[in-house]
């Protein structure tokens, strides 16, 4: 009983601590465990200012490619008109600036931005207001250059006075919108500096989040050149607002590097700032990426193409991660091409696995990935049949309960025996209340005589805790469930229940299961067990509704299991 009491006290204490911490975050106070979003005014310097900081760099060393900005103006040459070209497909709306040919804005047309609230109770009030509850009207924007966010994709040449991401490009005429029946739309940009011509061709395909990027280097000089192509993802280091341990809307941004030799390496801007970021520096495979919640942008060069990998602080609160790929020697009059891919879209497991080795690792399942991945695989199989993620969770929970039924039955049998033996345990406590050592010895002897495992009743819960935590991370990381409805008032399983109906049902079901268990002999422990349903129910106000649904179904099934075991599987002599 001392062991069981200790376990319960730990659960009780952690529940109170997490509940208090989550309440503090929702009321704008500092978290004890998770730093709040940076509330200071952003000091982002835009990429153009960062580039001009090294305008006289001349021949750019590879380490400084993130700040490439050699002046490429040709004396006497006519001024090239700068414009922003918008390419629209069924999945993208992309803005490309002819100044540098950089991708400065990318809107995902099939993903709506989440509605953020200043207070946890606002969704509840919206449902009962005269106006309809706020619905997301704006699409998710990945690449962006604004007062609040700097997130760009840039490319160019280094190794001499060549076109780079600050050079003026000219856009070739062409279709800018993916028309009905067309499979792709292309944008061709050209820039020539010092007799070296760079042609960028961006290919956007129907239903595809991959942008094919082709760099063609034409040497119009009288001597051979040896340029390198670079492509980088530029991002500010300001932490996004919102988010928390129990919120599936919590944003984050982080660079990442993958190679077969050193595998997946997730970095952070703080280490890049201090020049202490450790990652693979050279490879002939892999990719670099910029991560955020549910979405990712990744630069994927051709396999077996040798490349340098870099991370770099470009300017105040501005960082880059990218690749440098040698083109080789380009003879006078010759043209050499380099192909790579830019994936920018959702962290969909099925898609990422097909695009590049290791790209599915950007989907962060936390420390329990070895459990979460097979769980999500099973849930996907169920979803392919059912077609609704809410009912998928229900069927998944039933499958888990059936798989664990033998262990659950053993636990419930142990609890049934505990009900019978509780008076004897109470008598032992009274007899040796002034001698804890003899009390423990007598208790152990009683357990041995009655063939009772004092922790048997805890097994059904303890066994499911890893599944519970893994499912939490599945809901946190799976864009497949983002915005997925269940029924009625549950319109997004990754968000909390706006009406708190599921947490209330959970409290009722947990209270019933508590009553079906043997009452603890310790009065303090018994009182603690009475409050557990209420504590967990309030905690579940902030959990994703899909996770609460799992526990509601789990508790209802547990009640049914206990009834079956108590009435059909437990001998009469073991019943109270």
Image (tube, rainbow, N blue to C red):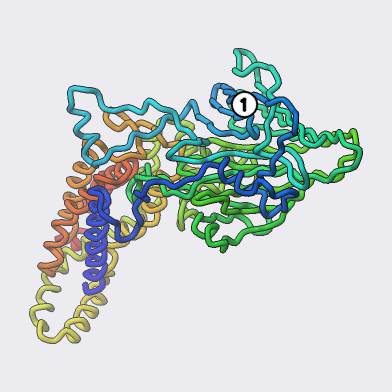
Q: Residue at x 30, y 32 (%)?
A: 490
Q: Residue furthest front?
A: 76
The picture places residue 155, in percent across and down from the top left corner, at 67, 39
Q: Position of residue 492 (x, y in %)?
A: 35, 34
Instruction: Give neighbour class at mark 1: few <14, some 14-19, many 20+ (Cα, 10 Å).
Output: some
The residue that mark 1 highlights is: 82
On-image quarter of the C terminus: bottom left
Secondary-structure class at tag 1: loop
| Residue 356, picture quadrant | top right
**Quadrant (top left, top right, bottom left, bottom right) of the N terminus:** bottom left
> Who's the residue at 11% across and 83% down the image?
432
Q: Is residue 7 above or below residue 477?
A: below
User: Is 364 displayed left or right of 489 in the figure?
Assistant: right
Q: In this orientation, does residue 343 appear?
A: yes
21 lies left or right of 376:
left
Which residue corresponds to the image point at 58% horizontal and 56% vertical from the top-left?
Answer: 265
Quadrant assignment, res 515: bottom left
């Amino acid at each position: 009983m001392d062991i069981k009491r200790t376990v319960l006290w730990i659960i009780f204490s952690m529940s109170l601590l997490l509940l208090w911490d989550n309440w503090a975050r929702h009321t704008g106070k500092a978290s004890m465990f998770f730093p709040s979003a940076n509330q200071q005014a952003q000091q982002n310097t835009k990429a153009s200012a960062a580039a001009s900081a090294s305008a006289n760099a001349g021949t750019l060393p590879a380490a400084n490619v993130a700040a490439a900005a050699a002046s490429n103006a040709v004396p006497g040459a006519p001024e090239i008109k700068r414009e922003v070209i918008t390419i629209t497909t069924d999945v993208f709306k992309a803005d490309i600036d002819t100044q540098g040919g950089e991708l400065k804005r990318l809107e995902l047309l099939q993903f709506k931005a989440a509605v953020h609230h200043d207070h946890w109770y606002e969704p509840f009030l919206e449902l009962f207001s005269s106006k309809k509850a706020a619905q997301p009207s704006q699409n998710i924007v990945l690449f962006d250059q604004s007062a609040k966010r700097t997130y760009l994709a840039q490319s160019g040449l280094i190794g001499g006075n060549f076109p780079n991401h600050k050079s003026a490009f000219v856009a070739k005429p062409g279709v800018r919108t993916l028309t009905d029946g067309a499979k792709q739309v292309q944008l061709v940009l050209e820039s020539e500096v010092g007799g070296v011509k760079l042609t960028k061709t961006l290919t956007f395909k129907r239903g595809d989040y991959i942008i094919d990027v082709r760099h063609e280097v034409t040497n119009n000089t009288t001597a051979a050149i040896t340029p390198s192509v670079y492509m980088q993802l530029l991002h500010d280091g300001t932490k996004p607002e919102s988010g928390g341990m129990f919120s599936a809307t919590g944003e984050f941004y982080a660079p990442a590097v993958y190679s077969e030799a050193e595998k997946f390496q997730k970095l952070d801007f703080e280490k890049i700032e201090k020049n202490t970021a450790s990652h693979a520096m050279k490879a002939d495979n892999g990719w670099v990426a910029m991560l955020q919640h549910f979405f990712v942008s990744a630069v994927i060069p051709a396999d077996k193409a040798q490349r340098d990998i870099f991370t770099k602080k470009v300017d105040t609160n501005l960082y880059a991660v990218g690749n440098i790929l040698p083109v080789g020697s380009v003879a006078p009059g010759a043209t050499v091409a380099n192909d790579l891919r830019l994936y920018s879209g959702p962290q969909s497991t099925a898609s990422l696995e097909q695009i590049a080795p290791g790209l599915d690792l950007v989907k962060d399942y936390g420390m329990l990935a070895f459990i979460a991945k097979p769980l999500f695989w099973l849930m996907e199989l169920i979803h392919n049949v059912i077609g609704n993620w809410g009912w998928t969770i229900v069927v998944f929970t039933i499958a888990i309960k059936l798989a664990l039924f033998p262990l659950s039955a053993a636990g419930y049998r142990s609890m049934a025996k505990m009900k019978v033996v509780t008076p004897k345990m109470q008598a032992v406590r009274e007899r040796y209340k002034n001698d804890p050592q003899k009390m423990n010895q007598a208790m152990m002897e009683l357990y041995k005589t009655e063939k009772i495992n004092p922790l048997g009743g805890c097994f059904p819960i303890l066994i499911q805790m890893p599944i519970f935590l893994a499912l939490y991370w599945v809901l946190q990381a799976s864009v497949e469930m983002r915005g997925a409805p269940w029924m009625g008032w549950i319109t997004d399983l990754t968000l909390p229940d706006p009406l708190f109906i599921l947490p209330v049902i959970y409290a009722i079901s947990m209270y019933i299961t508590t009553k079906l268990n043997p009452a603890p002999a310790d009065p303090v422990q018994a009182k603690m067990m009475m409050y557990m349903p209420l504590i967990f129910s309030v905690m579940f106000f902030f959990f994703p509704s899909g996770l609460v649904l799992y526990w509601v179904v789990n508790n209802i099934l547990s009640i049914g299991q206990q009834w079956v075991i108590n009435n059909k599987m437990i001998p009469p002599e073991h019943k109270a």
